[in-house]
Amino acid sequence: MTMKSKGIKIYLFAVVSILLALAIEPFWARTALLNDAIHPEVMCELLDGQYFTVVDEVTGEEIFHTARVVVVGDMFQNADNRLYEVVAVDGLIGKARFLRTESVGEPSAWFSTFLEEWGRTGVLPEALRAQAGQNVRISIYHTHSAESYLPSDGASSIRDNGGIFIVGESFTGNLEKQGFQVEQNKRSHDPHDKRAYMRSRRTAMEMIRQHSPQALLDVHRDALERRYYTAKIKGREMAQIRLVVGRQNPNMRANKKFAQELMAAANKRYPRLVRDIFFGRGSYNQELHPRALLLELGTHKSTREEAKDGANLLAGVLAAYLGAAGPADAAGIAREGGAARGSLFFVLGLLIVGGFAYLFLSTGSLKEMNSKVRHFVSEEFSLKFGKKNK
Amino acid sequence: MLGLPIGLLALVIVTILILSGIAQRVLDRMKMDDRTALVLVLAMLVGGLLPDLPLARTLSINVGGGFIPIAICLYLFVTAGTHKERWRTVLAVVATTGVVYFVSAYLPSDPATMLLDPIYTFSLIAGITAYLFGRSRRGAFIAGVLGIVLNDVVYGILLLMGPFTGKTVIGGAGIFDAVVLAGLIAVLLAELIGETREKLRGGPAPITADRPQGLKMPGGNDDDEK
């Protein structure tokens, strides 16, 4: 048998196998689409009732719980601004190391003023009041459209129409009351599979295109026991909020700063409203917008009313924060410059490191690499219009 | 994105510029001259801002993120150098579609369970599968793009068959969509793996009798033109 005919036979075999697999694929696909319950471990973050507990590696004290999958390198910042990094994961238990206490409000001078005055009185400082709330646009969408609140909705997951839509509506209504232009998109991205974020990214981009929002929020609920997500605020028991920032995201520094300032403002006015910030693996589509954030409004064991109450307080905080940020910009006060610059350097640094690694791999020596870089600069940056590349 | 502080706006613009630059360099490597590549990237950017074209109740297509990449694929396929290259490309498209489908349906859904975010993971999966089967930059691009597109089509059809309200837009995130990213990453991987293999072997593969006539120049590879 010649090499050529052997090669063709291998290809034929591969094609036939794949076609056969695809022929029966629709049945499997329909099963997965029709009945999420068949693969609960696949469709949800974890099995119902399971969650990660993260303990302090030194004291053994429980410091963090989440139904999101925790991996080494994840970080979280609690309401006291203590930043931890997960250093080991064994089953559903993680160990975290205390890194540092994050300073919030520096170096943005306006934010310190805002935090102090608004946090104490609920009234914006005079200097930031001029255009507050004017022309601020916010876009809200739901990647996991089935997420629901068990006590109110009767199920923790309702395909295409979860209770999260109703809580999102209430959140939207409260932001609109503050004079903001808010768009809530109720498109379903179900099933809750690996491509859900890929589909919701299209919704997010569509909203950015049509609405040019100053903040882009993906609203979810967590899946923990109710006790981890409930606090008494202003005399009422309500669902707390977690902010999630994607670590694999070139905008991470900008998103992180947004999350940190929002948590500081929220907890200054309403202590314990935002329970923490989780910095998890993934991008959660946050590279699409420098003020993109994922919100967990309570958990599946919270009632919808509790989730609405928490969300409505957050709406007031967001309104004050974004409202104050507007005039701060207009007044030429340096804002978010540091975080944005950091993100820019990150993106450019990644490009340089990636390019260097690629060149080294493909040339194998510094000398050859040098000549290739020269060639690259002289060839790639001179557009050869009308001439086909050889 | 008016109304954002200047630093954040600069961040958005630089991200788009870098991605466009990469896209232009990638297209440039596939039977296109610099100007065509530049025009196509601009068309993708502008097309991404146009309203989506509806295909069915559950499926639409974005001009910049879907229509133009698919048109590029068709052009590359029609102008493929050899019959064998076309054959390999078809195989690569089928394989990529299958692998992306199974990975998305049968692995855990939380982004944290993957080493990389799904958007990059699917692009990488499509890229690796596409390179293994396609073995050329053009084949890799076509398989990367169509692997994601066909999965969207399957999703749209399945939604149509059931009592579901979902909808998706092929290439809806424009130049940031998995459709475009998968194509770009596939080509970059093809180049990276190809160059590394060549280096490990100590130079280009020896010219054998079954190599197509047009590729017999020393130092040539599958993507060189006839």
Image (cartoon, coloured by chain):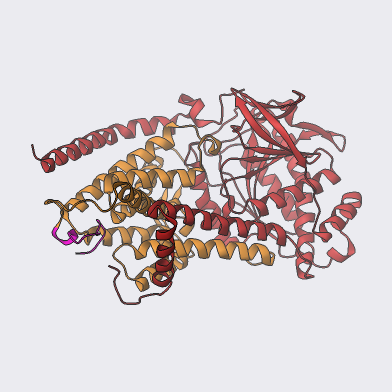
Residue displayed at 80% across by 32% down = A231
Q: Position of residue B153 (x, y in %)?
A: 36, 47
Q: Residue at x 42, y 34 (%)?
A: B105
Q: Is residue B4 visible?
A: no
Residue A286 in sight:
yes
Toward the viewer: A282 or A380? A380
Check the image and report above or below for B39 versus A23.
below
Would you say residue B221 sits in the magenta stretch? yes
Q: Residue furthest left?
A: A1
* Residue A25 image position (x, y, % from top left): 32, 34
Q: Quadrant of the N terminus of chain B?
A: bottom right
Region of the chain picked out in magenta, as a range:
B213-226
The chain letter of the red chain reads A
In this rendering, position of residue A80 left or right of residue A298: right
The percent position of residue A103, horizontal first and vertical second, equals: 80, 48
Q: Which chain is orange?
A: B
**Residue B200 versus residue A230 in the image, above or below:** below
Viewer-side residue, A195 vs B160: A195
Majority secondary structure of magenta residues: loop
Residue nearest the viewer, comparing B61 with B84: B84
